[in-house]
Amino acid sequence: MQIESDFLIIGSGIAGLSYALEVAKYGSVNIITKKEDTEATTNYAQGGIAAVSSKEDSFEAHIEDTLKGGAGLCNPEVVAKVVEAGPRCIQRLKEIGVQFSTRHRGLKSRFDLGIEGGHSHKRVVHAADFTGREIEKGLLAAIAARPNIKVYENHLAIDLLTQHQLGGKRKAGEKTRCWGAYVLDTRIEEVKTFTSKITLLATGGAGRVYSHTTNPEIATGDGIAMAYRAGAAIANMEFVQFHPTMLYHPEANSFLISEAVRGEGGKLRLKDGKFFMQHYDPRRELASRDVVARAIDAELKRGGDPCVFLDITHLPPDFIKERFPRIYQRCSELNLDITGEWIPVVPAAHYICGGVRTDSDGQSSIENLWAIGEVASTGMHGANRLASNSLLEAVAFAEFASQDSIRKFKQLEDKSLPRFPDWSSSGVFDQKEWVIVFHDRQEIPQLMWDYVGIVRSNYRLDKARERLGILSRDIEAFYRKNPVRSDLIELRNIATVAELIVKSARMRRESRGLHFNLDYPERDDRKWLKETLVVSPEGEE
Ligand code: FAD
Ligand code: SIN
């Protein structure tokens, strides 16, 4: 079955939905999403969205903070473009009904601005501590009002459609071109062919490549793996951000304690009550995330403790309940009263700065394929993303990519789409050995946590590479022989992304931003003021 549309969007988080609202003015749009439409990392975002919104702040300051955070690897042009789009992005979200927290001064109401690590001014616009849920709800309501946007829930993209699936070889000098994706309808276990003139990858991040992560289950790096297999350039995969403060509790399942808690004065303590951030950075708790996560990691390794503690008990209980209702409620469910008790926290994988390399409009190295949001590496974050710059980047790039891809769409509007062969299951049989999928799904994230975590070394990276090589070969062989299933598709993607992270980490012979290697502890601007790039044989000229 071939399902056609002008625009195909893979992913229903902030990036995909924001883009859909723009391009739907020009053509038909299909959005596919692998679970329910709300099930996106966006829905879990707490802290907020960074945008210059006060007289005291300026674009220059936001740009400077972002460049400083990115440790020399941001693209300054992209940073300026995104930061300057900030107020427009907030306005657009407000217009579709997103309600941000405000503070009243006299008769005037202003955004209640938060501050997070690495920001020199208060500029984080938020909806209490459930900013993402509020944004996702607003975007989905706006999408529902557009008759030419169709959302396919429980549809999981397997691979992009390119010349490869048409059975042809690219001519010399011809670029790889994308016309959509093969997609598994997970309710009926049938693979459908979604074709389109323009395809947008908005599949989010890859936190689930690690055993300890703040990310929801959907974050298995599918978009990065699909783009890599299709031959797209993938950049900067070594820069995995570890959030310093995930709740440490056996039943908490990846629950984040927002950086905004430290922004409101929360202090980190060891179990004996001692503060320690003063030994690591003059900005203490509000140093950038890489610094705070490494500091906690060092303290945990030194003392052998399972967690450190975040203390906000000095704040008035009513303020805590109003400012952090979601965190207060979740902790209360676990019998932890954060108004009177310290919160046990540990670092966890949170965000991937690398991904599908794009230009400053979100276009990938594959023709007719754009990538925005966490799946992309646009040049905005460099070697380390500043808090709350991710939601901003996603909305801003939805604007840039929609304008750019609409121009391309107008050139393609009258062209017909190629007919792709249906998904082939010939030669496939059920080996009834799915235990390997379960086992490898445990092993790879654990291996990545142990060997490719906050602090790395050549020895650990080489061990990881060896083991991943064996696992990947087995997984690929199993994938070729057995019927497609969502757990297998995701495992294959996790393995690919893990290999890309290790490969990129091994390539960079220095420490910078989020990448710290004990064998090269210094930053080397002479040789390494550049991105790491990986391209599969499919993408080579
Ligand atoms: P997502 O929101 O993750 O959406 C991806 C979509 O793609 C989902 O719908 C998913 O189901 C779908 N998908 C994935 N693979 C497939 C496939 N193969 N087929 C079909 N569909 C697929 N950033 C900030 O700027 N501010 C914050 O306050 C903030 N808080 C955060 C809190 C938490 C707990 C976490 C984990 C992250 C936070 N971040 C924050 C980061 C930010 O939320 C994400 O980077 C951002 O939401 C990513 O948006 P996205 O649209 O790119 O991806
Ligand atoms: C948080 O609220 O701490 C997450 C913010 C972010 O990742 O940008």
Image (cartoon, grey):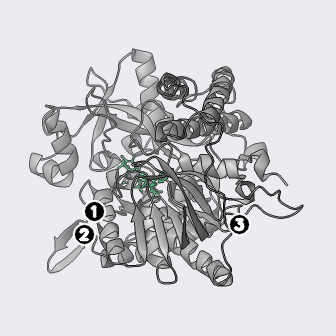
Provide the residue designation for mark 3: 367
Residue, x 49% and y 33% (percent of image)? 210
- Label 1: state its secondary structure: helix
Q: Is residue 237 above or below residue 476?
A: below
> On residue 134, which mark appears?
1
Do labels 1 and 2 touch, CB within 8 Å? yes
**Callout 3 environment at 10 Å: few (<14), some (14 to 19), or many (20+)?**
some
What kind of residue is marked 3? Glu
The earlier-in-sequence mark between 3 and 2 is 2
Residue, x 27% and y 55% (percent of image)? 130
The percent position of residue 520, horizontal first and vertical second, equals 69, 30
Provide the residue designation for mark 2: 99
Q: Is residue 17 above or below residue 266?
A: below
The earlier-in-sequence mark between 3 and 1 is 1
Looking at the rendered image, the disc whose residue lies closer to the viewer, 3 or 2, is 3
What kind of residue is marked 2? Gln
Closer to us: 369 or 299: 369
Image-quadrant location for residue 525: top right
